[in-house]
Image: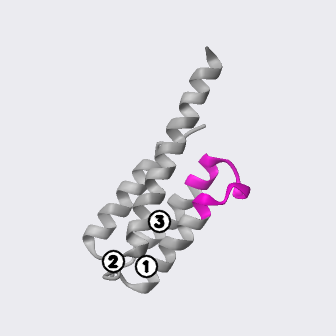
Amino acid sequence: MHSTKKESKQRENQERLASAIATLDIIARSNNIQRNIRNMVKEIQIALRDEKAGSISVRAANAISMLDSVTQNPQLQSHIRTTLWQVVSSLESIRE
């Protein structure tokens, strides 16, 4: 029973991670967003995908930190900032 609960939690974490990466991908591909923001979002995607960087929760925590600095940019459009906050919320729910 314990292993199925653990597997279920891992599956949920993977789904949240995949959702966050997909949302970041949409932002990274958008041409109406400043290049520096797109580049930072791409770096965050790479960090989230890099399994050598640690467990899924460690990668999520690192990405949250990076996203926090991106959302502090005063030139960031408000709708993109809101989307990034939603990604942060999704990543915050990843726990092992």
Q: Nearer the viewer, mark 3 or mark 1?
A: 1
Q: Which mark is residue 70?
A: none
Query: Element at badge 3?
Result: helix
Residues at circles 1 and 2 in contact by the CB criterion of under 8 Å = yes
Q: Where is mark 1, residue-wise?
A: 37
Q: Residue at x 54, y 44 (%)?
A: 14
Residues at circles 2 and 3 in contact by the CB criterion of under 8 Å = no
Give whichever of discs 1 and 2 has the lower sequence position: 1
Question: Is residue 69 something that shows in the picture?
Answer: yes
Its colouring scheme is: one colour
Q: Is residue 84 left or right of residue 1?
A: left
Q: Residues within 10 Å of mark 3 (few under 14, many from 20)?
A: some
Q: How far across and down, in percent of the image, does residue 96 sit?
A: 61, 37
Q: Decide which of 90, 32 is in the foreground and name it.
A: 32
Residue 53 on the magenta segment: yes
Query: Element at badge 2?
Result: loop
Residue type beneath disc 2: Leu
Q: How far across and down, in percent of the image, does residue 10 sit?
A: 58, 36
**Is 4 drawn above or below residue 68 in the view shown?**
above
Q: Where is mark 3, residue-wise?
A: 67
Q: Which mark is residue 76?
A: 2
**Span colored in magenta:** 47-60
Question: Is residue 94 something that shows in the picture?
Answer: no
